[in-house]
Image (cartoon, helix red, strand yellow):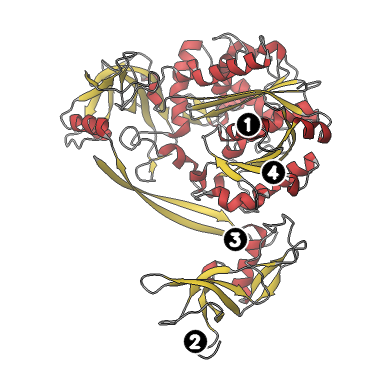
Amino acid sequence: MRQVAVIGSGQTRHARCRDDVSQAELVREAAAAALADAGLRPADVDAVLLSNMELFEGRAFPELWVGEGAFACGKPCMKIATGGTSGTSTCIAAFHQVASGMFDTVLVVGFEKHSEGHTQTGMALTDPFWDRAVASGALGNFALSISEYMAERGVTERQAALVAVKARRNAAQNPHAHLQMPELTVDEVLASRMLAHPVRLLDMCPQSDGACAIVVASGDRARRLCPRPAWVRATATRHEQPTLGDIDRRLCSMRTLRDAAHAVYAAAGITEPLAELDVAEIYEPVTYAELAWYEALGFCRDGEAGRLIEDGVTTMDGTLPVNPSGGVLSSNPVGASGVIRVAEAALQIHGRGGSRQVEGARLALATGYGVYAWADAIVLGAES
Amino acid sequence: MIREGSIHLPFAYAAGPAASRFLVSLRDEGRILGSPCPACRRVLCPARSFCPRCGDETGEPISVGPAGTVVSFTAQAGGVVFGLVRLDGADTAMLHRLLGDGMRWTIGARVRPRLAARRQASITDIEGFEPLQEPGDGT
Amino acid sequence: MSERIVALHTMDLTWRYASGEAMERFCAALCERRIEALQCDGCGRRYLPPRPMCGNCRLRLSRWVPVADEGTLVAWTVVHVPILDGRTGELRPAPYGMGLIRLDGADTTLNHFLAEANPARLALGLRVRAVWRPDLRGAMDDILHFEVLP
């Protein structure tokens, strides 16, 4: 397989409502920014991959309507949808296309306009014979799993609130981020409205309109075009049984993410992720999930995630900064969110993170999470 | 075993600046706007903010039509006829209804828009396209 | 920017789902207030909802086993915000209790409503029992909710 790198990225301003642009125009905003960042013209792109959860906007074949905004006319173009992992899965597909030698340059664009439709629909239309009558969305799923996780691992509401504060303070350094709450405190998180016990408003991600694009290139092109390519060191994606009750203690076990992380660490020669990784951009739709992911990703042993956040290990000046971008907790245009993880991880390797740059970042992890049924892990590095 | 059901869901789609301008101009002035592409020189109708083929941002929108030419058409069961109409001054065709009971439509027929009396910035502010002259008159 | 046009559409989506053989038998049993699971001959897991194959062992399932309408609460929450009901598109009134319940005789858990919506009275490990509606129709909402046993 050939070497592959991320050589550029572009994002829109993410916001609750971007009714100043159409879907195609939103996509174009990110696509044009990514091409400019990589120093390429539309004609230089060989293929386009899109990521979006079409049911959220109630628009069939979004790739048909927004492809032209991604400069896809006359080129191979298709879409991937796997829930929250859509973006990371689409990036991985692009890596494979370039690694295989099929294409030299692929543009990935993820987008979502939650303001245009019913995000809850996607989570409400579960098995019509089994749990559609009771399904309570991503929020209900998480809240149930969190009760098991808290009981088993001893995590507290205050520790979860620390995650919320870290995310929103980091987001204040990210001009693209939807939520801008630089002064947020733990007490404010704990005083925010209860959504589904024990998940409070500020524990949860927002619903955002936004798009993000990355440019993926083969080794030769990357070396020629980019002073510091973000080399794809390893990727893994895992699927799981569908029904909420199929897996015991989903948040505790998180077999998908655990397996995917194990696979990319092995492939990239990482034995101590906390010490060896310089930065991580992980898909954390709720504060408690970030704590569970610390354990699944091997940043600490099971049961130690609460201590990790209390000790500031994952803050910007900690051993392993997690989500300098502010994460999904600060911006969540679902189809774009996975692409944002990869774009932000790549930005750190490029050394162009601006005020959210982790000094000297050379090894980065990006992850995706999709409805408990999918997990993706990607390691990017400064060295090929 | 079969289970049937239905769900009702509201959606709100933003038109964006170019299509908004197209719809507002249609509503307020009864004018149809197209967007010129600076690269390929085509005029795209309805107006849009970028050229799908070239990727370039389009220039200031211009009036096209109102008369146009039927590029293709299909008659549905029940008498509804849909056609692609290329308006004079535009290089792309737009999909709309062709109006006129019992018309024998032909490719190349000349048409003009019939505007709704009460317009609300929707593509249906054009009720459809009707013949400029009756068919068989040599058009 | 000048006037922003937003097009409003309400979509009416209709569907017609086929249950498949396993779910058909399961729903027929619900009409008799019985719950049945399918057990995997490979790993021994007793699956609810019943399904044609075990996703882990990739074996076809055909061994039906009875499951009680009583079980243990393994996860719970109280939902305070209205959530879209996937059967109608309407918002479901809140608050309401919700749990993951391991019915006696099953290995997977079932998510369903709880009669109790006071967090102070909910805990992992509580014993719960199904409250059935009088007019059974062969659907999961034949169970109205689960009540906490003393």
Quadrant where the image shows the N terminus of chain A: top right
Residue A86 image-quadrant placement: top right
What's the amino acid at mark 3? Ile
Percent x, y for residue B104?
45, 82
Judge left or right: residue C12 versus residue A40. left
Residue B116 in sight here: no
Mark 3, chain letter? Answer: C
Residue B20 image-quadrant placement: bottom right
Residue at the extreme bottom of the image, as rendered: B137
The residue at which mark 2 appears reads as B135
Percent x, y for residue A179?
65, 36
Q: Secondary structure at mark 4?
A: loop
**Which label sits on residue A96?**
1
The residue at which mark 4 appears reads as A46
Q: Find the distance from the CA under tag 1 to the CA under tag 4.
A: 14 Å
The residue at which mark 3 appears reads as C5
Percent x, y for residue A205?
57, 33
In front: mark 4 or mark 2?
Answer: 4
Residue at 31% x, 42% y is C17
What's the amino acid at mark 2? Pro
Looking at the rendered structure, whether the residues under marks 1 and 3 are on a common chain is answered as no
Judge left or right: residue A333 versus residue A11. left
The mark total stands at: 4
Residue B110 in sight here: yes
Task: Between residue C145 and residue B10, name the one nearer to us.
Answer: B10
